[in-house]
Image (tube, rainbow, N blue to C red):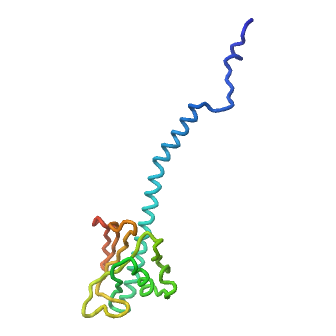
Amino acid sequence: MLLNKAKFFKRNPSGFTLVELIIVIAIIGILGAVGIPAYNGYIADARDKAAQSTLQSIVLMQKNYYQDNFCYVTTGAGTDVGPEINKHLFGSSDDEKMTTPIDTTASNFFYFEITGETSSACDGSGTPKTAKNFTVKAIKRADTSQWFTINHKLARLDQDGKTW
C-alpha cells in the first residue's frame, strides 16, 4: 500500500507551539523592562515641570505685590508655609488657602516657601512679612535634597546649581 506523502506530512495549523509562546512572552518582558522605567521618568519630569510652573506663578505675583507695596512677601522656611503664599499673594480666603490656587496639602509632591532679606524700608514685622528681596523654593517632599528656586532677579537654579 502506497502512503500519500502530502497527507502524512500535513500540519494542523490550529494553535501556537510552546516555542512561539515563549518568544512572545520574552518580547513582552523586554518591552516592559525598557518601558516602565522610561514611563516613571516621564512622570517625574512632569511633576518637576508642574513645580517649576508654580514657582513662576509665585514670582509673577511677587512682582505684582512689589508694585503696590515696594516690598516682597516672605513666609520663612518650612513645610507648612504654603497656605500663607495662597493667602497673601493670591488672595485666597482662610477656607481656601490650603488648596487654592496652589495645592499646599501633603498630596502635592513639592512644598513651597519664600525667604528674603529684610531692610529698614521693609521691616518684616507686619502681616504679611515683607523683605527687600526674595527666593521662592519648591522642595520635594519625599527627598528634601531635591529642589528648584527662583529669586527676585529671576535667576533659576536647582539643587545641583544648574539653571532650569
Q: Quadrant of the C terminus?
A: bottom left
x and y, in percent, of residue 49 in the image: 42, 67
Q: As drawn, is 16 to the left or to the right of 129? A: right
Query: Measuring 42% from the left and 72% from the top, which residue is drawn there?
Result: 53
Query: Measuring 48% from the left and 86% from the top, which residue is drawn there?
Result: 92
Number of residue marks: 0
Q: Is residue 129 above or below residue 106?
A: below
Q: Quadrant of the N terminus?
A: top right
Q: Is residue 23 above or below residue 154?
A: above
Q: As drawn, is 153 to the left or to the right of 55? A: left
Occupied quadrant, residue 24? top right
- Pick whichever, 42 or 144, lies toward us: 144
x and y, in percent, of residue 5 in the image: 69, 13
List the single residue furthest toward the top: 1
x and y, in percent, of residue 162 in the image: 29, 65
Query: Measuring 48% from the left and 81% from the top, which residue is drawn there?
Result: 98
Q: As drawn, is 88 to the left or to the right of 123? A: right
x and y, in percent, of residue 141 in the image: 40, 69
List the single residue furthest toward the right: 1
Q: Is residue 35 above or below residue 158?
A: above
- Pick whichever, 70 or 104, lies toward us: 104
